[in-house]
Image (spheres, rainbow, N blue to C red):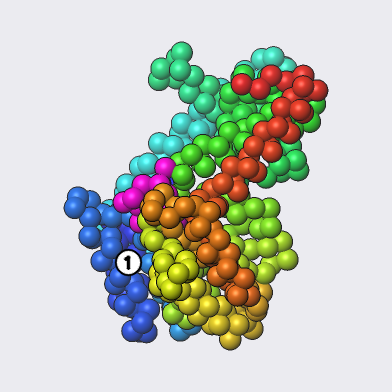
Amino acid sequence: MAIRSDWTLEIMLEQARDACDDSDARDSIVDALTHMNSGKSGRRGGRHLVELMQAALDLAERTEDESVVQRLRDGIDYAEGRKFKRDMEDRYPLFRDKRSDLNLSFLGTMLQTTVEYSRKICEEFLQEHPSATGDEVVNHLRSLELDIPFMDAPAERPGRYRLVRGRAESAAWITAVLADRIDVEDVDEAARKIVTNPAALAALAADEGGEVLIQAMELKRRHSGLTNLRAVIEDPDSSEHDIHRALRDQLWIFGGRFVGEARHRRLVPGDELDIPLLRPDGTLCVVELKRANERVVKRHRGAWVATADVHAGVSQALNYLCALDENRNEVVAEFAIDARRANAIVLIGHPQFQPDVPEATVNEALRIQNAHLTRVEVLTYKELLDAAERSLLLDDQTLKRNSTTSPSTIT
């Protein structure tokens, strides 16, 4: 998802900064503004901008300054595309001198076009059903309204758009199949893609439950994501941020013990978690990311032991866990997350960046390290990738068995 960063957002943040009385929250807003204006050309956005705004929001919420809190909340929604620019201009005095004339002209044109289109639809319906009642005309328009989100632009007709009747009903069925039978991160978007693709829709219709086709879609997505993640991890120049970005949409890689990532990464004052994973019961697992090109073992008195970088990562994770334990009641009350006795995973290193040490030796040294830890586990990125690869292999074999009994054709 692209993060929007423009003049409207900058003005909103400037207004929040000027209205903020708390110095810490104001400094966090300044950090977000500084990030926006640090690009070589244009305003800089990205996920980091949202994280900076979220940090400012967390601080502002403690001051109970509702005007600042509301601006920051709306700013985050606007940056992530959940609010429209015109809504922001209406709610806040951003461009008050030009807003009225421009918006009235735009809305007038849109309303005229909409009314004209609706009139033509009603006329066509009444020509086909001359005895139709008013309720039947309204229901016809309502069904058309439901199909509008699934409009597409056919490649064979450049500049034209196609609205196919009945897509909304098909999408509702597909959404139910997606939601009930397999985990898909964005169910609505997946349904929209299927319902606007005739070949995919035909294959899904041929499969009584839609299960095989949908499993194939999800496996294809996971294979692609794992390939991309492996490339990032095996790149010696990749930073922790690069790895985090590649992992963001691939949380399945941590196994079926987790249901997703917590929305907030700053759960306690002063600490921002890399990846806060949630179990089905609402308990927490902290994933701490380190660089993949770090050396993880060294020779010490005739034995292989973990390096200082590994110990530093473990200590950082333990500090997070300690803070979460101490603030358990506040975290439960504010975020509905049980942080008491949470555990942590430290991801660091890859055997390819330590070619002078056999991979088995690296793994054995870390197993010895982990045997003496109770709440923190250290893994190399290769161990994580290999486990995900084995999981996908089993899923592929299951899919092949299922596809032999399904009438659908998976390509």
Q: Is residue 359 left or right of residue 279?
A: left
Is 166 above or below relative to 48?
above
117 left or right of 101? right
Near mark 1 (Cα within 10 A), the count class, few <14, some 14-19 or many ≥20, is many
Q: Quadrant of the C terminus?
A: top right
331 vs 396, nearest the viewer: 396
Q: Looking at the image, which residue is at 66% across and 74% down? A: 338
Q: Is residue 131 visible?
A: no
In the displayed structure, does residue 144 sit left or right of residue 361?
Answer: right
In the image, what residue occupies the spot 25% across and 66% down? 34
The picture quadrant where one finds residue 375 is bottom right
Between 276 and 73, the one nearer to me in the picture: 276
Please name the residue that numbered disc 1 is placed on.
32
Q: Label 1's element?
A: helix
Query: In the displayed structure, would residue 289 be above or below residue 396?
Result: below
- Residue 25, image x and y in percent? 37, 78
Q: Main secondary structure of the magenta part?
A: helix
Q: In the rendering, at what x and y percent does residue 299 appear? A: 41, 67
Q: Is residue 68 above or below residue 149?
A: below
Give the residues in magenta.
231-245
Give yes or no for residue 104 being in the magenta stretch. Answer: no
> Camera-side residue: 285 or 1?
285
Q: Position of residue 121 (x, y in %)?
A: 59, 23
Give the quadrant of residue 166: top right
The part of the image, by quadrant, that contains residue 60 is bottom left
> Is residue 241 magenta-colored?
yes
| Residue 388 visible here | yes
Coordinates of residue 334 in the picture (x, y in percent): 60, 76
Residue found farthest to the left: 40
| Residue in the picture at 46% in, 31% down | 113
* Location of residue 310 with respect to 105 vertically, above or below: below
Q: Which residue is painted at 67% across and 33% down in the image?
A: 396
